[in-house]
Amino acid sequence: MKFGIVVFPGSNCDADCYHVMKHVAHQNVEYIWHKQDDIKDFDALILPGGFSYGDYLRTGAIASFSPIMPAVIDFARRGGPIIGICNGFQILLEAGLLPGAMLRNRSLTFICDTVNLRVNRTDTMFTNQYVQDQVLQVPIAHGEGNYYCDNETLKRLQDKQQILFTYCDADGRETAEVNPNGSVSNIAGIINERGNVMGMMPHPERCSEPILGSNDGLDIFLSIIEWRQGVGMR
Amino acid sequence: MKQLTYRQMGLSDEEFQQVETILGREPNYLETGMFAVMWSEHCGYKNSRPLLKMFPTEGSQVIQGPGENAGVVNIGDGQALVFKIESHNHPCAIEPYQGAATGVGGIVRDIFTMGARPIALLNSLRFGDLEDARVRQLFRGVVAGIAGYGNCLGIPTVGGEVYFHPSYQDNPLVNAMCVGLVDQDEIALAVANEVGSLLMLVGAKTGRDGIHGATFASEELSESSAERRPAVQVGDPFMEKLLIEACLELIKEDLVAGMQDLGAAGLTSSIAETASKKGLGVMVDVLKVPRREEGMTPYEIMLSESQERMLIVPRPGKEARIAEVFDKWGLDAVVIGKVTADGMFKIYEGEILAGEVPVEALTDGCPVYVRQGEEPPHYKEAQAYDIDSLPRYDLQEALLKLLASPNITSKKWVYRQYDYQVMTNTTVIPGHGDAAVLRIKNTLKGVAFTTDCSSRMVYLDPYRGGMLAVCEAARNLACCGARPLALTNCLNFGNPEKPYIYWQMQNAIQGMADAARALNTPVVSGNVSLYNESRSAQVFPTPVVGMVGVLDDVSKRCEMSFQNEGDIIVLLGRVRTELGGSEYLAVCHQIEAGEVPQPDLHEEVQIIEMLLELCARGLIKSAHDISEGGLAVTLAESAIQGGLGFETDLPAAADQASQILFSEAPSRAVVSLAPENLDAVKEMASRYQLPWTVLGKVGGRRLVISEGNHELIDLDLEQAGHTWGEALACIMK
Amino acid sequence: MVKANIFVILKKGVLDPQGEAVSHSLKVLGYHRVEDVRIGKFIEIVLDSEDPEEARRQLEEMSDKLLANPVIEDFRVEIVEGE
């Protein structure tokens, strides 16, 4: 399987994602510079974290108009798997590939910490290696992770089970105290209706090796590989 | 721009006369400005250079010592660490966010200009009393600035220290350290080798920011300092990120002969330093420099401190490829001059010669002052303080008070704002170990970093205090299992023209040098920041040590938390009772006096070696050295971080409980280990000729310290954890 | 030459913690009559155009596409010079 990591000016976590895909998941992986206007032969795309364009104007706003984006949108339209991590999630929102928008953290400060995430669905191409309601320990590091959508959109996300990851306590309970940034309904990650585009604020590439404290993130990448091998969707 | 006199630019009458003698004529405005910034303390080190000669700078591990943008040490596998610490104190007092942000920007440029990818940031911060709203505002602004800039660059901020003391009320200290990783065959130096080499300027356009910033950093703060607000530069971390990626690509493709970043004194110092190494000359045409503002004079162009700019000396014939790389990253790269043979620095504005000075006059020609130091009266008074005259203080209350005090309490409020995990190398995160430990991908190795200085100790006894700073840094690394390799330092002092201050400098540097020699941690880079005082206060002398170490096997790293019920707790090193300079005296008794505990360099070497062997052989579960707050705080922190209580028994020493619990004497650490390893540890200690004391056991939910049958302290673990964990966040609400 | 000011403001239902923090700070400074603070963005644009209607159309398009995020923000275009 060939993974493509899109690199924008200001992306930081591209090398971290590359390391996991190549040296931990042992996959074929290449960087895709944002100025390319086509994506050939890639089976899955990763939009990594960072500060594309310095977060100027709005985080992810300028990147969403990069030359590569029409090809990314087309890739999504054809059903290809796309995962947007942190800034990548913000870019997917700005590009309209996922509903909603990102606001500044409620605390108005950047927060770097490890949080508990509940996996709400295991029948997607990103979560088939998990157990229903499994609680993961995943790092977050963001200043604008306060996911927002209006009530109508929230209802639709809930009805169609598009909320993939929720901030929770160690027992999987969703409470206000454990919400690090004020996101609506403790939303940490969502998936599109079709199920092939996923965005999450926490960083799975930072917890894919035991030496970094947790292995919980690796299964997201392994899920994509599993899905691709045809066993994924149940 | 208003015309300044040479005095306003920072040159003394004697210095101005020296310039006239060198040139054989009166310098014009541009030339005066260039000498003023190059001969400022910040750029020329004129008051500190003679003292810096005391430092040991060599060793088999040293690839590059002082004299370049940063120091370089060999870590094996053909790799090296490039590192330096630098201050940005004066700008932070005026505009804390941008002052701190541009401080980070500056130190990062010093690292990647040598071809190294920055892999870590640390910082050492000092502020006044947190009760003061203005101090809280400065603190908030500085932390936000470091976070805002460092996080955007994608470089993890993995460690550091923060201290609060009234002496820093008007003069916060903000020292930023950066460490980079490089393959030894890719190290780039700031040197222009050949006559005819071109000089290319790349990065941000040049504006009027920061003109005379170097001068501003070389004088005391006063009311008029706020009017100098235009002198504070504004940083653009996105631009810097682009520069990092582009410049490292140039290195990978071997396109450059030399690279130099632009920092204090802008183009003037950057070009002068590049050319002076080989006795060459340069010519520059200021009209070629891309500008952000209209009507800029040669003076303004040459002295501008606009951020995020680099000077590149291309390999002959590689200019086009270099331009392509910069174009890919959306950066401007233009040729602004070239290297000549005549040793002169010629500045042109198109066809017109605007200024001409000998290059070496700006660098090597900078005057050097050897001043007189004089022991201040407070020194002997403080030494003579009779600690035995102290009233009794409830020990449990003392421990709680210390855990809640700003200098000891958890700094989570700070480091939570820093991304400490980006680049996925951080294996010991802030708050969990005595140093930060990072893995090196594709090797088994680890590297560790720390910054340390106990400024109260330096104030009370500069010689011993300087020594203690180096010892503590090395011990912190050893507690994590890392062998100390070398250090960088940032010497923050007051006005060196005052004999008491100069005396502090002389003695602190001597103490640091003696320790560095004994511990085999040569000084490979550093920075000096003087004149940190205002009319009302002088800062405590604060020589900050930034040290790096290496672990052959990163899986052998050690953290500070207790791990398992039943583990044995052992004090390595002597039981000591000296309370001089301790937080206990300051926080509980409001006293800053006493004889600073005497370091024993031989003993320090022994405990460092023993800690390294203990970690390498996997014999201990935790290690935490004794520093602020003494033995009691060390035990409490290991318990709180581990979520496990302890029961300990102090070596009975009639009526000396408070001394034993709160002494901050060096060369000691508290380790915990599985009971079956106790014999091995005892045997090792006797081999290293180190005393040891079994203190007790890990277990339960309480922190218990007894003395024989008499219970001294019995605290609930959760309560202690809450006190220690939340104090700073509460103050900053 | 057309000079325009573009105001980008958070939509009514969207929480503004920055505005709240500023409102609180103003009250602490003694301005007790402050009831609400909302913080937005102010963008100055200079267009090389002689046709004010076309310029306005373009500015609104720019605002809708890039300068504001219609999910969370509203905008207002004000032509300062050239209309």
Image: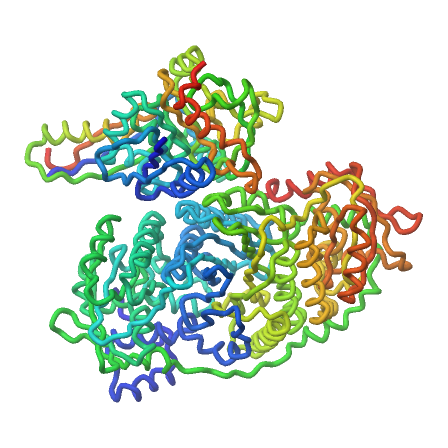
Left/right of residue B128 with respect to residue B322 in the rendered view = right
* Front position in the image: B492 or A162: A162
Q: Give the quarter of the figure containing the C terminus of chain B.
A: top right
Residue A61, image quadrant: top left
* Front position in the image: B4 or B424: B424
Residue found farthest to the right: B709
Q: Is residue A191 visible?
A: yes
Number of callouts: 0
Tell me if residue B123 comes above or below residue B313 in the rendering.
above
Horizontal and vertical percent position of residue B385: 77, 69
Tell me if residue B184 comes above or below residue B413 in the rendering.
below
Residue found farthest to the top: A159
The residue at 38%/76% (across/down) is: B39
* Front position in the image: B591 or B3: B591
Horizontal and vertical percent position of residue B171: 51, 61
Q: Give the quarter of the figure containing the N terminus of chain B.
A: bottom left
Tell me if residue B540 comes above or below residue C10 in the rendering.
below
Tell me if residue A189 comes above or below residue A58 in the rendering.
above
The residue at 50%/70% (across/down) is: B62
Left/right of residue B597 with respect to residue C70 in the rendered view = right
* Front position in the image: B67 or B497: B67
Horizontal and vertical percent position of residue A144: 42, 34
